[in-house]
Image (cartoon, helix red, strand yellow):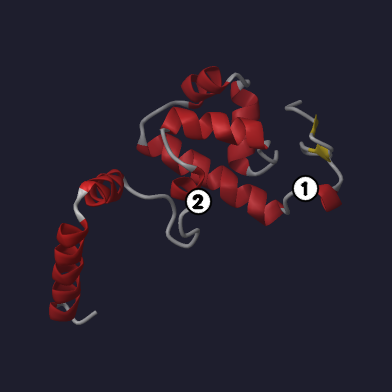
Amino acid sequence: MLLRHIGGVSWGADAPKSKTLGRQEAARVGELIRLERQRRRVTQVELARQIGISQSDLSRIEKGEYRVPLDVLFRILRVFEMSFSEFFGDLRQGPLTKEERALLESFRKLSPEAKGEVLEFVAFKLAREGQ
């Protein structure tokens, strides 16, 4: 079984519910991991090897059967080269796409004046499209 007790909190399929994520939250985190892994065309075997867990444990995490321990989540994010906030983003929309991340990284490199120009252009385009 995957890590069962971390920092005073039990994890895994038979952990007490009061100290774990709810089933829906665990399933959503697992789904986000699966979607990002598939988007990157990485197999479960490859990712599991890179983060130091078994493929079967990763499969159960992705299905929401196991709650992902924070240390495992941080290892996954390190492999994906994503921050916690990038990964979770707006949970209704899922993680950022490759194009969205590239746009954000480019935007952050701009001067304050150039950022203002980009924002004005985006506002113009949205108004033109009726949004």
Taking the spot 44% from the left edge, 35% from the top edge, the residue there is 37
Percent coordinates x, y for residue 15 in the rendering: 83, 41
Q: Is residue 68 above or below residue 18?
A: above
- In this rendered view, identify the residue nearer to me: 88 or 30: 88
Percent coordinates x, y for residue 121 in the rendering: 13, 68
Q: What residue type is labelled 1?
A: Thr
* Left or right: 87 as drawn, with respect to 103: right
* Left or right: 88 as drawn, with respect to 6: left
User: Seen from this angle, which residue lies furthest front?
Assistant: 112
Q: In this view, does 82 lie above or below 118?
A: above
Snapshot quadrant of residue 39: top left
Snapshot quadrant of residue 2: top right
Taking the spot 48% from the left edge, 49% from the top edge, the residue there is 85
Taking the spot 15% from the left edge, 58% from the top edge, the residue there is 114
Secondary structure found at label 1: loop
Secondary structure found at label 2: helix
The numbered disc on residue 20 is 1
The numbered disc on residue 88 is 2
Q: Looking at the figure, which quarter contains the N terminus?
A: top right
Taking the spot 42% from the left edge, 50% from the top edge, the residue there is 95
Q: Is residue 10 above or below residue 112?
A: above
Q: Distance between the residues labelled 2 and 1?
A: 18 Å
Percent coordinates x, y for residue 116 in the rendering: 19, 65
- In this rendered view, identify the residue nearer to me: 85 or 52: 85
Q: In this view, does 48 lie above or below 81?
A: above
- In this rendered view, identify the residue nearer to me: 11 or 83: 83
Percent coordinates x, y for residue 26 in the rendering: 66, 48
The numbered disc on residue 11 is none
Q: Name which of mark 2 and mark 1 comes first in the sequence.
A: 1
* Left or right: 26 as drawn, with respect to 20: left
- Pointer 2: residues within 10 angstroms few (<14), some, or many (20+)? some
Q: Which amino acid does label 2 sit on?
A: Phe
